[in-house]
Amino acid sequence: MTRLPLTRIDRYILRQLSFALVAVTAGLVALIWLTQSLRFVELVVNRGLSMRVFFGLTGLLIPNFVAVILPITSFVVVLFAYQRLASDRELTVMRASGLSPLALARPALLLGGAVMLGCFLLNVQIVPASFSAFRQYQWEIRNRLAAFLLQEGVFTTVSDNMTVYVRTRDKDGALRGILVDDGRDPNSHAVIIAEHGRLIATGEAPRMLMVNGSREEIDHATGRLNVLTFDETTVELSQSAKAEEQRFRDAGELSLGELFNPPPGAVQSPRDAGKFVVEAHRRLAAPFTVLSFSLIALVAVLCGAFRRHGGIVRPAVAIGCVVGLLAVGLAVVNLAASAPILIPLIWLQAILPGVGCALYLFELIPQSWLNLPSLQQR
């Protein structure tokens, strides 16, 4: 089987599309990363984490950003690159030389196919692995690393409902003058005071060994203050008061095989099973939107009447169609999570617009069916 070689025109258009796609995607990813990473600035400002940890944590979100915006940036690049070729009369010259719509669209289709394969790789392998690493990293920071950032004379917020105060911290790691406000259990909000202690790292969540102290809490039934003195006790420094809290993985962290066959303990409710299946189909169907959106852009530029001064109606309609398809895609995914019978709509939303545009663009559907004028020069 012989491979159809790329012509000079193919390489010319493909080069413009590729450079524009890399530039636009990189710019949008940087912008989204900047806005999303602001949520984690608090870890650096209030908890003293290093910038290396900050960039390592937020950098794990980048593959997910790329997978989400690639279909959109592919549409934008194809639409405006071909629109520029049309406004510069380059498409007119190419048509006059005998190039068919398929020949003109071939560079965009080649780029769309390559991007679609990249989206498959991202959705199936890279994004679940990076998101799982992000959740695990975030878990460790909140439940383990923050406890080792206790500063002398500072009330350190270990979690949303737990605060630790240490008067002094020796060079050998010993803590003196310890006060712990533990509100993780709403039914037994306690204040624990100890003369000295030490941090003990065990597993996911560290423990604080406290020596010679007391535990004070109010009995809600009687309103009395209960005081329990101790010689030695340990306190979990984690989000939960449970000694062995398990971190459950959500659908975004599971691999494709795990989504179709969830591991034991992954399904917490019958509704979760439906969400897992919907997430699996979404990952497999989403890459096809790259070709669909690219074909919508090609139809907007290559079909319809030629205008010497250009026009904004067809590009505006194409943008509206893509925005509408994105909204429909989100709605279908949410509906299919509660009604699995709607899962085929996920595939229809991703593939059907591209098939329709391809049939019309390559004249497999008569233009008269859609009441659109054929190409003519004015």
Image (tube, rainbow, N blue to C red):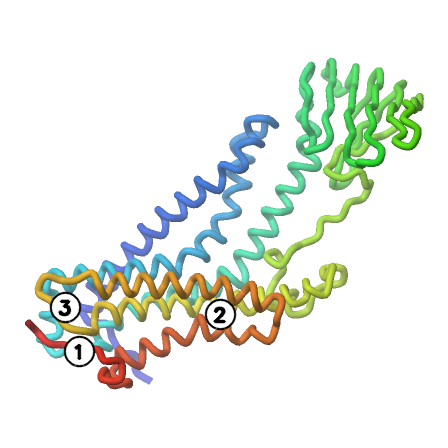
Q: What residue type is labelled 1?
A: Pro
Label for residue 136? none
Q: Is mark 1 on a helix, strand or loop?
A: loop
Q: How far is disc 1 from disc 2 in space, using C-alphas?
A: 33 Å
Between the residue at mark 3 and the residue at mark 1, the CA separation in whole angstroms equals 18 Å
- x 37%, y 70%: residue: 292
**Residue at the disc numbered 2:** 285
Q: From where the camera sits, is residue 257 visible?
A: no
Can residue 23 be seen? yes
Which label sits on residue 373?
Answer: 1
Image spot of residue 364 (x, y percent): 28, 85
Residue 71: x and y, percent? 39, 61
- Amino acid identity at mark 3: Leu
At x 44%, y 54%, the residue is 66
Q: Mark 3 points at which residue?
A: 91
> Which numbered disc, 3 or 1, marks the residue that appears first in the sequence?
3
Q: Which of marks 1 and 2 is nearer the N terminus?
A: 2
Residue 41, position in %: x, y? 52, 33
